[in-house]
Image (tube, helix red, strand yellow):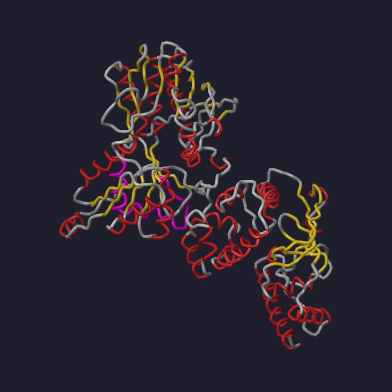
Amino acid sequence: MSRQEAVEQYNRALRQGRKCYKDCVLRGRYPYPQVLDEILSESMVAGQVDLGVIEIPTDRVTGTKTTGRRSSFAADFMPLLDHDTEFATKWMDLCQAHLEEGVRDPIRCYEYMGRFYVQEGNKRVSVLKSYSAPTIPAYVIRMVPVWSEEPAVQAYYDFMRSYQMTGLYRVAFSRTGRFPKLQAALGYETDHVWTEEERRRFAADFTCFTDAFRKLGGEELRVTAADALLVWLKVYSYEDLHHSTPAELLKSLRAVWADVKVDPDTIAVNTNPEEPAESGLLTRILKAALPKERLHVAFISNHRADDSDWARAHDLGRQYLEAVMGEEIAVQNFQGVPLEEGAEAAMEAAIAGGAQVIFATTPPLIGACRKIAVQHPGVRILNCSVSMPYTGIRTYYSRIYEGKFITGAIAGALSRGDEIGYVASSPIFGVPASINAFALGARLTNPRARLRLRWSCVEEDAMGALAKEGVSLISNRDVPAPDRICEPWGLCEVRGDSFRSLASPYWHWGNFYVKLVRSILSGGWDALNSTNGPAVNYWWGMASQAIGVLYGEELPEGVRHLSEYLCQGVAAGTILPFHRPVRDQSGLVRSNGEHFFSPEEILHMDWLCDCVDGSIPGYEELLPMSRSIVRLQGVYRDNIPPEKEDPIL
């Protein structure tokens, strides 16, 4: 390399440094590299760890250990001094040596909270940064921060644990608990220590991914490239990452970019259908004269209606939709499709057949929904589930807790003693709210009522166990459809060795689908455009007639009238199940009677009222058949260690 080339490289770096300096000043930012000694005090450090010589990401070198030579560099470590200074001469000497022989001597630096502060080798860092070198050898001393509840500190402690397995500084997340999900996505056990070959392969692939992340403006977000990779891996595989060209990788990341930008804990809960705007007389006449284009709708289920009560309820909803809106829609129906590849194939077939809206009726279909949504962004895809943080699809479910509140009031009115049994399904979103709503309903009509709680996901005959313990009224699983009330659904009375159903909440999926399709036709979907906002969850209740209460023949007439009055109040919004004094089992006041619980607070309840005897079971207590739905929808799903075969949520 000629001296002239080194001079030209310095001049390019000088222009870049001065531009960075000017931009920082204009934006009110510090224009020089940060100084660790100025931002760190002894009280902030729990200890030091000598990491020896390792490869560190050059873009994480953001400052210097001391104030020496600070004014020689801009914040991006590009030079600020004229090319005829001694500093510039040494910089160019190092540049020339770098290209002829390579810069072999490691720098010395300190690391704090994932950032590196140079003690020796500032000019080496500057030269390598000017050539966009991805890594630099460094002798590193880690400054361990004092533990605190600060999310950034917790995330860093999480990183220190994962670093012991990866040996890579690039694999850092903005939140705790995400590294095990990466391990699962890569096909590793949670505690797998990466081999040198695995480390090198991932580092090379992740460098390409990080380049795409930066090109899309990722450095302006509050997430890391590793966070973005986890979002990407929900749709694509690690093999896709390894074999994608830079252009393909950029395109695929752009397809899921809305999910990368959105806070995964932020979901817009839509609690009522959007009412179509009333058209004027002339508009209605013109519309009537024009030929109508049908909205093409497809239903996808991984069960058959003959084999599953849940699938049957949704199929009845489909039939109701066709009966009510037959002239406005065209419907395709796919039942019993296998998960993942089979579901994707069914959705592709539906789209090839003209589907503009797809309803996937069970939570396990969420993975296929995500993949199809990326490939067909113009198709409206909905999954019957709750609290899924994806902007490319929407979720829908019913506020069944409102019906539980009503049957709780019935139970309290009919109870001969103070104890009422309750069999809950699984610890998934919405179930604790249903338990609590039932308990508060029971207390409405019997202030001394207490719930004896059991779980069908823990014991196979929880209802029989309660009956053997002498409980005479038991709330069991709800009626899935409005066309029947059979034994033993809903609130049951124990009669010897049998159960007699008295009342039960039910899902009316037909009403749900009709109102949702009409909302789409009237522009309601676009009004909730989630391309750049939070994910959308339709969570409708009695006001939209998505749920109701069925009564058994032997329910006393007076109690039935009471129930009907309560239903009217809940539907009108004048009776709110949780708008009353509420304490949890620890004695904590959740409401003093004035607090209005938001839909998000109700949906994500993970606590039980103080009048409930029982607890939310841990994952290890669940029957094997119940674990998959808890991994998808569990109230503590983020704390469940992932397994290699799990979908990455």
Which segment did they paint magenta?
512-537
Q: Quadrant of the N terminus?
A: bottom right
Residue 96 in the image: state x and y as whole percent.
76, 82
| Residue under the image location 39 percent in, 33 percent down | 400
Residue 556 in the image: state x and y as whole percent.
30, 15
Q: Is residue 91 above or below residue 144?
A: below
| Residue under the image location 52 percent in, 69 percent down | 245
Q: Is residue 59 magenta?
A: no
| Residue under the image location 34 percent in, 28 percent down | 567
Q: Is residue 574 above or below residue 529?
A: above
Q: Is residue 521 magenta?
A: yes
Residue 74 in the image: state x and y as whole percent.
73, 71
Looking at this view, is 348 or 615 the one in front?
348
Q: Would residue 480 appear left or right of 391 to someone viewing this image?
A: left
Q: Would residue 291 appear left or right of 514 to someone viewing this image?
A: left
Looking at this view, is 209 or 573 the one in front?
209
Residue 58 in the image: state x and y as whole percent.
70, 66
